[in-house]
Image: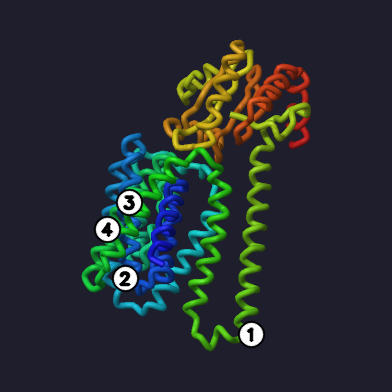
Amino acid sequence: MFLLTLTAAALIGVTLGLFGGGGSILAVPVLVYLAGVPAKQAIAMSLLVVAVTSAVSAIGHARAGRIRWRTGLIFGAAGMVGAYTGGLIGPHLPEALLMTVFAAMMLATAIAMIRHRRTPPAGPVHREMPVLHVIAEGVAVGLVTGLVGAGGGFLVVPALVLLGGLPMGVAVGTSLLVIAMKSLAGLAGYLRSVPIDWSVALPVTAAAVAGGLAGGSLAGRINADRLRKAFGWFVLAMGAFVLIQQAPPALLHSAWTAAAVTLTALAAAVALVLRRRRSIKRNQLQRSDVYTPRGIKEKYVMTMPITVTAANWTEHVTGTGTILIDLWASWCGPCRRFAPVFEAAAGRHPDLVVGKVNTEAEPELAAALQITSIPTLIVIRDGVVVYAQAGALPEAALEDLITQVRGLNMDEVRADIADRQAAAT
């Protein structure tokens, strides 16, 4: 059974390396149900696992310059206060209550992973987050971490992106620093009253770290988005299992309870599907003002070598000729896979202007272009945006798209745009 526990810990690490978060939420169930560790000890051990794996993962981001140190240290310090407080309170609460709260965290994490968007749009751009915002968010998220031993990355990253305006890659790297700091503080709080079996804790932590390194090496080689959603559904099922385990035995044998659980699960699934459909419709509406020539097939989407910035955008996109612009980021696996395809196309078509926008370095430009997913390809001909879609085209599809753009009659395109604008008014 201990070997199975180590295997599960390694898989948790792999998910951390692939997704940048979410996998650590399974540390407590693994320790409780596989290793037979009492709930409070499992929460303390989980804090150790989360702290060490996050710290190790943060090293690579720091080397790549993807950690905003001032924001991370302020957020992390505030989180440490909340986490240490939670670590002091948690050992004095009933285990059933802690596990119930933890199950709720699992469900929230699962939904966040299922609904994950590759690149959430940044909020107003700041050099750093407002200090009071940072402290408030840090204390609140840290308290949850200290109580139930979950890293809370799905809460930290959106806060850094949406409130602080950090680019997604920087937000992920900074969140790992924050999670490591507050997890250590929560562990310190638990250790004041909860003993840890180090013969279990250290091997499990080592296995998770090894898995994290392996997952990091796999990032960009597999379709992490699909795997994330599948893993999210697994976490959702595990969260429901943990929640049911905390119900009184008499209640579990009730037919009404079984019916209620079934209906709740169905309602949650329906809600997720409907929300997903609404999201797709919103995305389609957001792209409706971008002219898509009738001759270009919708499936032919995009993406990357001059460096295009907010300062030189007008210089490159106005005038005659065709320009292909790839919006990318260093942390984006699909962007890395598409790069050689895009660069090869640039070599085959020297008459085209081919540019790249690094969304991490140019968050204001990305926000102005309403970029919500990367890689994204924008094709401009004679000053008119004729294509703007997200995704990574295979070589043949990119070539076909270029051919179709070359064949456009721009007088007809402008007339079509004028007709659409007139109809809209």
Q: What's the residue at 62%, 69% (across, down)?
A: 265
Q: In the drawing, does residue 262 fall left or right of residue 39?
A: right
Q: In the drawing, does residue 161 fall left or right of residue 335?
A: left
Query: Type of residue at label 2?
Result: Gln
User: What whole-number distance in Å separates the C-alpha atoms at marks 4 and 1?
Assistant: 44 Å
User: What whole-number distance in Å separates the C-alpha atoms at marks 4 and 3?
Assistant: 10 Å
Closer to the chain start, of discs 4 and 3, is 3
Q: Secondary structure at mark 1?
A: helix
Which residue is labeled 1 in the image?
A: 255
Q: Secondary structure at mark 4?
A: helix
Closest to the observer: 156 or 60? 60
Query: Type of residue at label 1?
Result: Ala
**Looking at the image, residue 185 lies above or below residue 164:** below
Closer to the chain start, of discs 4 and 1, is 4
User: What whole-number distance in Å separates the C-alpha atoms at marks 2 and 3?
Assistant: 23 Å
Q: In the drawing, does residue 202 fall left or right of residue 343?
A: left
User: What whole-number distance in Å separates the C-alpha atoms at marks 2 and 4?
Assistant: 15 Å
User: What whole-number distance in Å separates the C-alpha atoms at marks 1 and 3?
Assistant: 45 Å
Q: What's the residue at 29%, 59% (across, down)?
A: 202
Disc on res. 184? 4
Closer to the chain start, of discs 2 and 3, is 2
Disc on res. 178? 3
Query: Type of residue at label 4?
Result: Leu
x and y percent of residue 247 in the render?
A: 50, 81
Closest to the observer: 350 or 208? 208
Which residue is labeled 2 in the image?
A: 41
For the C terminus, the image quarter is top right
Mark 4 vs mark 3: give the one in front. Answer: 4
x and y percent of residue 200 in the render?
A: 31, 64
**Looking at the image, residue 195 lies above or below residue 75:** below
Tell me if label 2 and label 4 are in contact, CB under 8 Å. no
